[in-house]
Image (cartoon, rainbow, N blue to C red):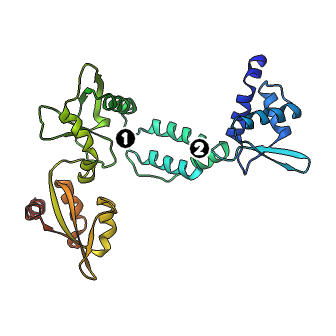
Amino acid sequence: MSANMQKIKLLKLYELLYRETDEDHPISRVRLCERLNEMGISSNVRTLSLDIEVLCENGYEIMSFLQGKEKFYYVPERELSVLEIKILIDAVQAASFVTERKTADLIKKLASLCGSHNAELLKGNMVCFNTRKHSNESILYTIDCIETAISRRKMIAFSYFHLNELVNEDNYYLMAYSSKHPDSTANYRIDRMDQVEIVWESELSQEALARINSVSDFTEQAFKMFAGERENVMLRFDRSLMGSVYDKFGEDTPIEVVDETFCTAMVYVLVSPTFFGWLAQFGNKMKVLASQNTAERYLAHIREICDG
């Protein structure tokens, strides 16, 4: 066993430095030798210096400094900063389509990229999200299968099940096209897809390929992935809602200041009940000026709710 470990000495040496050190947690040359010997890898102060020199000459950045008569080593930077990894961890926490078990697994892997000291800090200091996690453990396989089919330009076959529950806007969706319905697309929640398979002998039509290029436009116009009629809609809203308009339609949305109180913006959306729900949350602080068709449908939607 010791002979085998000696063959991968440099690998284990860098692995130890990468995992357990950083600028705030250097390791002394003596302690580093002790750790290697504990792992069954023969090491001493002289050979250790030569080993680290070889690693540095081959592109592995290892910093060192003298403190009195003792030399210390550490790995200065990772591919991702602690802040960047923290953002990724928060995103995993907030994603409802990632199951509880997979969330814990991904957080552990992400935190380990920061080294052992920062890993414990990250795992113990996370933002709490009120997110309902789904239980479909095969969802990552489903996503991989779908992305493979898209990249290979192949069709997929799958089973789909429905649940009578509230719509959660943080879900992962598949926007699908079928030649049976050439004028529209269908949206499927990936956590409700089962038995997903690539139809390897299939070929996508030109119409389907064209739809792939328009996905970004669709997602900008859709509300919670509900389809509807595409329309240009003129909104009049209180200036305090400018941030909400930018958040929903993008910071490049042209907004015209009408007076000290109101602004207007022309937006291109898929008109649907979820769009009306988004409008309704602002009460009389946001109104539809045009199109007339959208304004009338919005009014009918509100009346239907009030009439029960």
Mark 1 and mark 2: span between their CA atoms?
27 Å
- Indicate the quadrant where residue 156 lies: top left
Q: Residue at x 48, y 50 (%)?
A: 90
Camera-side residue of 217 and 187: 217
Element marked by disc 2: loop
How many numbered marks does the figure carry? 2
Q: Residue at x 42, y 48 (%)?
A: 94
The quadrant the N terminus occupies is top right
Residue 190 visible from this viewpoint: yes
User: Looking at the image, is 259 positioned above or below residue 36?
Assistant: below
**x then y, percent, for residue 4:** 74, 18
Q: Quadrant of the C terminus?
A: bottom left
Residue flagged by tag 1: what amino acid is it? Phe
Left or right: where 290 falls relative to 283: left
The residue identified by callout 1 is: 97
On the rendered structure, is 102 left or right of 187? right
**Nearest the eye: 218 or 39:** 218
Task: Tell me which corner region of the image, top left, top right, bottom left or bottom right, holds residue 116.
Answer: top right
Q: Nearer the viewer, mark 1 or mark 2?
A: 2
Q: Amino acid at mark 2?
A: Glu
Disc 2 crowd, CA 10 A, few/some/many (<14, 14-19, 20+): few
Considering the numbered disc 1 on the image, is that residue within a helix, a strand or a loop?
A: loop
| 89 to 306, vertically: above or below | above
Report whether 59 appears left or right of 184: right
Q: Pointer 1: residues within 10 angstroms few (<14), some, or many (20+)?
A: many
Label 2 sits on residue:
79
Q: Residue at x 68, y 37 (%)?
A: 59
